[in-house]
Amino acid sequence: MTPEQFNGSERRGYVRLEKSLPVRFKILKNPMSETYTATTKNISQCGLCLEIQFGKEALLEALSTADHKIGIDINTLIPQPNNAVSEMSLWVSGRVDWAREMDRVHRTLQVGLEFEDLTEEARQRIRDYLVDQFLQQYPQHH
C-alpha cells in the first residue's frame, strides 16, 4: 500500500501508550557516559519517545543523530511488581530513530527510540505494563 492509498491516521505497528514516566538513560557510545534523566511522551512494545530538558550541547549533539545507541534503565521506566525487589538496574538498548528540538526557550528535545535486542524478561515486563495500563484506562472492556 502506498502512502497515497492509506486513509487512516495511524501507521505505527504498535499502539502507543501516551504516558509521562520518569526514566534514566545514558549514551552507549561512551562507556563512561553519565546517566541522564528524562520523561517519556509515549511508550510501545517496540520503542518510546523521550522528552529531554537539555542544557549540555554535547548531549544535544549526541542525541540529534539517528542510529546512536542509548541505554534505558527499565527499572526506572516500568516499576517492579510489589512483590519483587531489584536493586540492580536492568538496562535495555535503544537506537535513536529520530530527534527534534521542540522548544528552544525551554531547551526541550524529543527523541524517538526503537528498542533493540530486548531480553525476554524485558520484553515481557514492557508488554505486561502496557496491557495493565490499557486495562486501567478502559476498564469497561475487560
Image (cartoon, grey):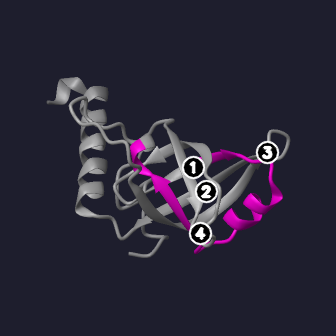
In front: mark 2 or mark 4? Answer: 4
Amino acid type of disc 3?
Arg
Instruction: Give the class, few, some or many, for how many residues have Cα within 10 Å of label 3's Cα (few <14, many ≥20).
Output: some
Marks 1/3: CA–CA distance = 14 Å
Label 4 sits on a secondary structure element that is loop
On screen, residue 67 above or below 22: below
Q: Are the residues at dot 2 and dot 1 in contact (C-beta closer than 8 Å)?
A: yes
Q: Which mark is residue 31?
A: 4
Marks 2/4: CA–CA distance = 21 Å
Q: Residue at x 38, y 48 (%)?
A: 88
Marks 2/1: CA–CA distance = 5 Å
Q: Residue furthest top?
A: 140
Magenta range is 50-75
Q: Quadrant of residue 77?
A: top left
Marks 3/2: CA–CA distance = 13 Å
Amino acid type of disc 4?
Pro
Label 3 sits on a secondary structure element that is loop
Marks 3/4: CA–CA distance = 26 Å
Mark 3 — residue?
Answer: 107
On screen, residue 130 above or below 81: below
Instruction: Give the class, few, some or many, for how many residues have Cα within 10 Å of label 1's Cα (few <14, many ≥20).
Output: many
Instruction: Give the class, few, some or many, for how many residues have Cα within 10 Å of label 4's Cα (few <14, many ≥20).
Output: few
Mark 2 — residue?
Answer: 111
Indicate which disc, 4 or 1, sits on the residue closer to the N terminus: 4
Indicate whether residue 71 is drawn in magenta: yes
Q: Residue at x 61, y 65 (%)?
A: 98
In x, y percent, where is residue 16?
40, 48
Q: Nearer the viewer, residue 6 or 140?
A: 140
Indicate which disc, 3 or 4, sits on the residue closer to the N terminus: 4
Q: Which mark is residue 50?
A: 1
Q: Quadrant of residue 2?
A: bottom left
